[in-house]
Amino acid sequence: MKLITAIIREVQLDKVREALIKAEITRITVSRVSGHGQQRIEEMYRGQRIVPDLIPKIKIEIGVNDAFVDITVDAILKSARTNGAGTVGDGKIFITPLEECIRIRTGERGGTAI
């Protein structure tokens, strides 16, 4: 089991969600987060140019069985790129081992609980 965490642009959420549903990945958690990496944007505030410290992003977390890791990552990669080719600030995907998953309602454990 793996936990896939993707940080993407806010405007790409609908495309990513549709791609995941098409790939039969329907259980996701979505959070609004802020951060920055290499992406820098300038804004005008009271006539002065400023560079905000934190940029709004979307964080998607998906617990999957090992067989679905590549399918999930491919769906996110293809749908989260800006203009199909990608630009700085499109985001990142992290894949971490998931030691245990427990469904609270039934007490199921492991891959069947996902």
Image (cartoon, grey):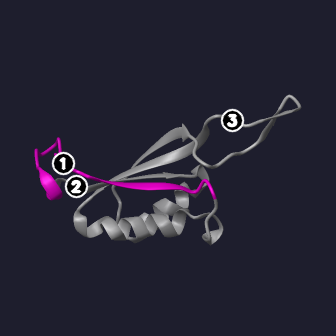
Q: Please state if 32 lies on the left or on the right of 96 as rendered.
A: right
x, y percent for residue 28: 37, 53
Residue 101 numbered mark, or none? 1
Mark positioned earlier in the residue sequence (2 or 3):
3
- Horizontal and vertical percent position of residue 14: 54, 58
* Residue at x-position 61% and y-position 49%: 38
- Which of pointers 2 and 3 indicates the residue nearer the eye? 3
Q: Are marks 1 and 2 in contact (CB under 8 Å)?
A: yes
The numbered mark, 1 or 2, whose residue comes first in the sequence reads: 1
Does residue 109 show up magenta in the picture? Answer: yes
Outermost residue toward the front?
38
Of labels 1 and 3, the one closer to you: 3
Three-letter amino acid code at the position of disc 1: Cys
Q: Position of residue 19 (x, y in %)?
A: 46, 67
Q: Amino acid at mark 3?
A: Pro
Q: Residues within 10 Å of mark 3 (few under 14, many from 20)?
A: few
Question: Within 10 angstroms of label 2, few (less than 14), some, or many (20 or more) residues?
Answer: some
The residue shown at (24%, 69%) is 67
User: Label 3 near label 1: C-beta < 8 Å?
Assistant: no
Q: Which mark is residue 52?
A: 3
Checking the image for residue 27, the label placed there is none
Q: Give the extent of the magenta segment.
A: 88-112
Q: CA distance from mark 2 to mark 3?
A: 38 Å
Secondary structure type for disc 3:
loop
Disc 1 residue crowd, few under 14, some 14–19, many 20+, Cα 10 Å: some
Label 1 – label 2 distance at C-alpha: 7 Å
Q: Which residue is mark 2?
A: 114
x and y, in percent, of residue 23 in the image: 38, 71
Q: Are marks 2 and 3 in contact (CB under 8 Å)?
A: no
Residue 105, located in which quarter of the rendered image?
top left
Q: Indicate the amino acid at tag 2.
A: Ile
In this rendering, position of residue 27 left or right of residue 65: right
